[in-house]
Amino acid sequence: MRQGTCNLTGWKVTGIILATLIAVVSYLVPDSRLADHHAAIMLGSFLTVLLLCAWLLKDLTGVVQDQKDQMERLMGTNLALTSLIDLKDHYTEGHSRNVRDLARGFAAYLTVPPRQVEQISLAAQLHDIGKIGIPDAILAKPSRLTDEEYAEIKKHPDLGADAIQHIPDYEDIVRIIRHHHERFDGRGYPEGLAGTEIPTGSRLISLADTYDALIHGRAYRQAMSTMDAIREMQAERGGQFDPDMFDHFIRFLSTGANTHSCDDPVCGMPVAGADPELSVSYNHRNYFFCSRTCLVEFTRHPDKYSDSS
């Protein structure tokens, strides 16, 4: 795959060819056709620039196509993984989308660098993928878990991280997933990290994960109002949650944060421009996508990803 940089040998060969072209034009073009050799050199230089621009344009076009292909592969991998979550537990899949959108919006609110925002978004989407390895009887249990059952639940961050650790360029995403149940006070799992030892993305997802779980409820707990959820989370400020990040999160929620506000309704990625080839109209609204993979997924399951879902 192209790396987006020009080969040094290629530049040398091109330089030699172009220098030869200038020399040929300047000495072989008759004076009767050009005023003097300076004009010939200018013509040769002009032709040189044209050839060089054509060569660079061809290389740049290849780089852009490689980036598009890489995006398609990334989205295909992501959708395959989230489909596995959906097969295991429809609640977990819907929760993961909510956490992804909320975490992405909060990361942008904190002015986290764009690349890190994308990593946090992907990690949030996949943060519960390790629950595929947890027995259904434990995940859906409507009463309090036993110590043995809770020990099983605590395995899911490692299970999820281990499951995706061999995907290229997922190193940071793996680390975020592995540590999204650490606590700021060091009493979390799996490694008992504390404070800023915990990755920024993990601390951020912990807030989004808890908030969404509280306002939507679980098998063993009814859904709470927004204010009740905030009050419950306030008790863990500095315990489970990074206190400074918690304060920013409350301010973020007060801005009217919408967990369904991402550009691409399927993967949550931003859409750079309104490409008509990567758009579709559904229920009187236009939706735009970062890749053809996401567009195809939306057309297969529009009610799952549209605002009406």
Image (cartoon, rainbow, N blue to C red):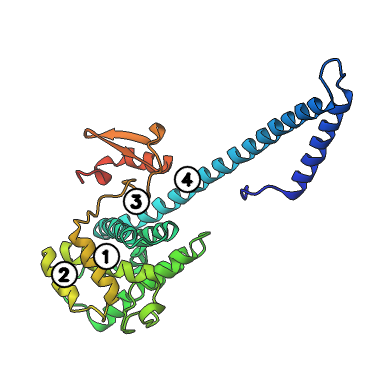
Q: Earlier in the sequence, mark 1 or mark 2?
A: 1
**238 displayed left or right of 124:** left
Residue drawn at x 40%, y 81% is 191
Q: Earlier in the sequence, mark 3 or mark 4?
A: 4
Residue drawn at x 82%, y 40% is 16
Considering depth in this image, is 247 or 238 the residue closer to the camera? 247
Picture quadrant of residue 66: top right
Between circles 2 and 4, the one closer to the viewer is 2
Picture quadrant of residue 125: bottom left
**254 displayed left or right of 275:** left
- Residue labelled with disc 4: 72
- Residue type pointed to by label 3: Gly
- Residue type pointed to by label 1: Ala
Work out how far the residue at label 1 is from the one at label 4, CA to CA, in angstroms. Answer: 27 Å
Q: Is residue 241 visible?
A: no
User: Which mark identifies residue 230?
Assistant: 2
- Residue labelled with disc 1: 208
Work out how far the residue at label 2 is from the one at label 4, CA to CA, in angstroms. Answer: 38 Å
